[in-house]
Amino acid sequence: MKSGLVVALCVFAAGCATQTIAPVAQAPVVDPELGVVPSPVVAVAEKPLRKGGGYYRVGKPYKIADNWYRPEIEPDYSQIGIASWYGRAFHGRLTANGEIFDMNSLMAAHPTMPLPSYARVTNLDNNRSVIVRVNDRGPFAHDRLIDLSRQTARLLGFLHSGTAKVRVEYIDKAPLAGKDNAYLLASYNGPDVSPTGTSGSQPIITAYARPPRAPSDQISAEILKSGTPFDPYLALINSQGAAIASRRFGPLPARQAGFDTPSPMAGGPFPMPLGAMLPLGSWRSTS
C-alpha cells in the first residue's frame, strides 16, 4: 500500500517537473469611452528611460469614438484649445511612433501632427511657453487640443489645475535621436520654476529656431523614412551672456554660415533676438 502510494507520488512529481504551466492571458483594458487600448509598459519607471528610437510617420486617417482624425503636415499650424497633462499612468509606455513616454521630459500627444515634431505651447493665462516633442497620439476626449507631459504642465503653470487654455504652434520635424530635453528646456519662456513649482527670479534662456540646412532624405506622403542625421547645432544666449549657457549646456559650436539673423519660431510671442537653435529638419522633400 505504501509502495503504491510512493510510486503514485513519484509519477505525480515527475509530471509536475516536466509540465509547463501557460500564463493566464489577460484581456487588454479597453477605455469604455474611447474604445482604445493603452500601449504596453516597456520600461521600468525607476530607471532612466531610453530616448528616441522611434520612427517618422504621418499616418492615415483614423477613427476614435465616432470622430475622424486626419494626420497631415501643416507648416502654418496654429490652434487655440484646452491642454491637459498625463503622467505616471503612462510613464514608460510606448508612444505612437515607437518612442517611450517620459513624464519628466518635455513630451506631448497630438491627434494629427506628424511624429516626432516640435511644437511651441503657450499658456494663454500666464504667457508661459515652451517647445515640446510631439511623439504620441491623443487626446481623444472632452475636445482637448493637446496632452502634455507632467513636466511640461509644471513649467506652464497648470500642474495643479489640470487643464489650461493654450496656443499650439507647429515648428518643424524633430530628430529621431530624441536627446533634446536640454534644447527644449532652453526654449522655456517665463519665470524661473523651482522643482516645487514656485517661481523664482533667475533669468531664463529663451530659444529661437533658425532655418536648418536642407536635409538629404526623401519623405514619402504616408510614412516618413529616416535619412541623414540632423546637425544638433546650438547657440544659447541669455541676458547674462553666452558664458552661462556654455556652463549649463557645454561649449557653443562654431556659428554656421547663413544663420546670422535669428527668426522667431512659428510667430511665437518672443522678444527679439536672444537665441538658441534647435536641431530642426524639414518634412518636405528638397527636390
Image (spheres, helix red, strand yellow):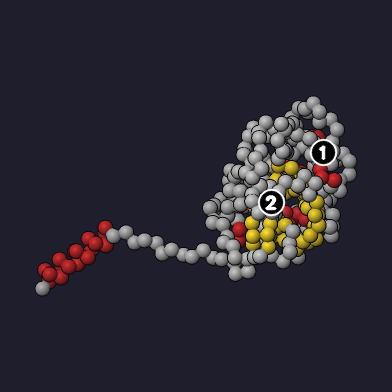
Of 244 and 110, the residue lying toward us: 110
* The disc label shown at residue 71, or none: 2
Q: Position of residue 6 (x, y in %)?
A: 15, 67
Of 89 and 94, the residue lying toward us: 94
* Alpha carbons under labels 2 and 1: distance apart: 31 Å
Give the SS element for disc 1: loop
Residue that appears at 64% across and 62% down: 64
The residue beneath circle 1 is: 275
Of 173 and 177, the residue lying toward us: 173
Q: Residues within 10 Å of mark 1 (few under 14, many from 20)?
A: many
Camera-side mark, 2 or 1:
2
Residue kind at label 2, given as amino acid type = Pro
Q: Tell me how many marks there are.
A: 2
Task: Pick the quarter of the image with the C terminus.
Answer: top right
Q: Residues within 10 Å of mark 2 (few under 14, many from 20)?
A: many
Q: Position of residue 34 (x, y in %)?
A: 63, 66
Give the SS element for disc 2: loop
Contact between labelled residues 1 and 2, with CB atoms less than 8 Å apart: no
Q: Is residue 262 visible?
A: yes
In this rendering, is residue 183 above or below 29? above
Residue that appears at 62% across and 39% down: 225
142 sits left or right of 262 in the view: left
Q: Earlier in the sequence, mark 2 or mark 1?
A: 2
Rendered image quadrant of residue 15: bottom left
Q: Is residue 196 visible?
A: no
Residue kind at label 1, given as amino acid type = Gly
Of 128 and 133, the residue lying toward us: 133
Q: Residue furthest right?
A: 272
Rendered image quadrant of residue 207: top right
Residue that appears at 80% across and 51% down: 78
Q: Position of residue 265 (x, y in %)?
A: 81, 43
Rendered image quadrant of residue 279: top right
